Each structure stands twice: as C-alpha cells, then as structure tokens.
Image (tube, helix red, strand yellow):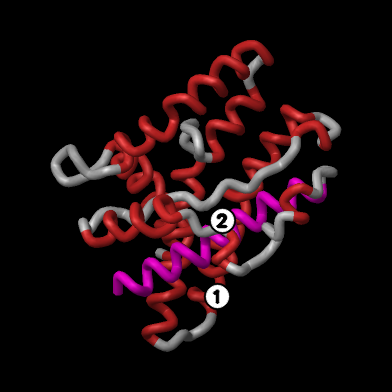
Amino acid sequence: MIIIWIIAFIVVITIHEASHAWMADKLGDPTARLMGRITLNPLASIDLYGTVLVPLFLALAGAPILGWAKPVEFDPYNLKNPRKDSAIISLAGPAVNIILAILLAIIVRFVGLPSLLGVFFYALIRVNVMLAIFNLIPIHPLDGGKILAGLLPPQEAARFDLFLHKYGIILLLLLIFPIFGGSSIVSQIVTPASNFILSLLIH
C-alpha cells in the first residue's frame, strides 16, 4: 500500500510541475520548456528531499504523504505582467490537481474498476486534493507563497518574498513533520480540508 501511495504521489507531482512549466510557456517565458520541464517524465521533477525522503518518512510514520518537487524555473522578465503572471503560473499546479481529482472521481463513480486499480485511482484522487491544498499554504517553496506575493502590493511582496526565501524551507519542515500528538501542524490543516473535498467527490 505504501508503494501505491508513493507511486501516486510521484505521478501527481509530476503532472503538477508540468502544469507550471506549460503555463509559463503559454504566458511567454520558454525557460521551463527549454529546460525540458514540460514533460510527464518524473525524473525531471524529482527532488531528493521533497519527492523522496520526506514523503517516504511521512508514509512510514503513518502521516499524510506530502512533499514538493524540483521547482519549475521561469524568467519574470519574459512575462507581460510579471507579478500577475507569476501568480497564475504558481496557481496552475494546484488548479490542475483539483481538475484531475474531479475527472478521476467521475471515472471511479461511473466505471467499474478492478480492486487494485480502484485503490490506485483513490490514491490519485486523494493525493491530488491534498497536494493542491498543501501547495496553497503561503510558504516557500510552495505555490501559495508565490501566489500571495503576486497579490500583495509591490513593496510588501518584495519583503514577503525575501523573508520566505530566507526562512521558508525551515518553517515548512517545522510545520510538516509529525510532532503534536503524532500529527503535524500542516496535516491538521490539510487533512480536514482534503476530507471535506473528498466527501464531495467520492461519497
């Protein structure tokens, strides 16, 4: 079961990152495309810590599988509206995760699936929803930080972005690992929100 969930996580996070790259290219910046990031090859997105070690540790600890991939690079100077377009690029990943979860839920509801495939589809749906919500948390390197920076006034956005680049990864690791009664602060936020959305999709 752990292997199924980890495979689902890798599939979902690969699609998530490819969505960022595709949107950046559509908005005028070819950087990600030239780096080979518009791809469903998971090797292009795997980050040793965020895609392998952290999810594996969480899975073995019985916690929700969360993590991150190698960030998609883009050059804001190639964008017509750098701040707004950067936020749109960041939002593309979570948005595609939710769309994919809805499509998979429709398939599960109306198509009879073999038991093992059904388990895999359920894992894909749940990981898509959880990854979308997780990535909307406004902490670097998650998408939420970039989205919030795109919505703030320029000076506040610059200070916020600087703070996140200095301390974001430390804050994220403190929030993600299980410490309070066997659960992390992030899971206490992500799990209830995910369960609510999943109740609408598959129950």
Measured as percent of width and height from the top left, residue 135 is found at 49, 43
Disc 2, SS: helix
- The secondary structure that dominates the magenta segment is helix
Measured as percent of width and height from the top left, residue 200 is found at 46, 56
Taking the spot 66% from the left edge, 50% from the top edge, the residue there is: 20
Q: Is residue 154 above or below residue 172?
A: above
Please tell me whether mark 2 or mark 1 is closer to you in this view: 2
Q: Nearer the viewer, residue 124 or 48?
A: 48
Q: Is residue 23 above or below residue 86?
A: below
The magenta stretch spans residue 69: no
Taking the spot 48% from the left edge, 85% from the top edge, the residue there is: 112
Query: Which residue in the rendered view is the most extreme toward the left?
Result: 181
Specify whether residue 102 is in view: no
10 Å neighbourhood of mark 2: few (<14), some, or many (≥20)?
many
Taking the spot 71% from the left edge, 55% from the top edge, the residue there is: 35
Q: Nearer the viewer, residue 136 or 114?
A: 136
Bounds of the magenta segment: 1-26
Query: Which residue in the rendered view is the most extreme toward the top?
Result: 155
- Please give the label number shown on residue 107: 1
Taking the spot 75% from the left edge, 37% from the top edge, the residue there is: 75
For the residues labelled 2 and 1, the Cα–Cα distance comes to 15 Å
**Quadrant assignment for the C terminus:** bottom left
**Quadrant assignment for the N terminus:** bottom left
Q: Nearer the viewer, residue 179 or 104?
A: 179
Residue corresponding to mark 2: 97
The magenta stretch spans residue 2: yes
Measured as percent of width and height from the top left, residue 19 is found at 66, 55
Q: Which amino acid is tagged 1?
A: Ile
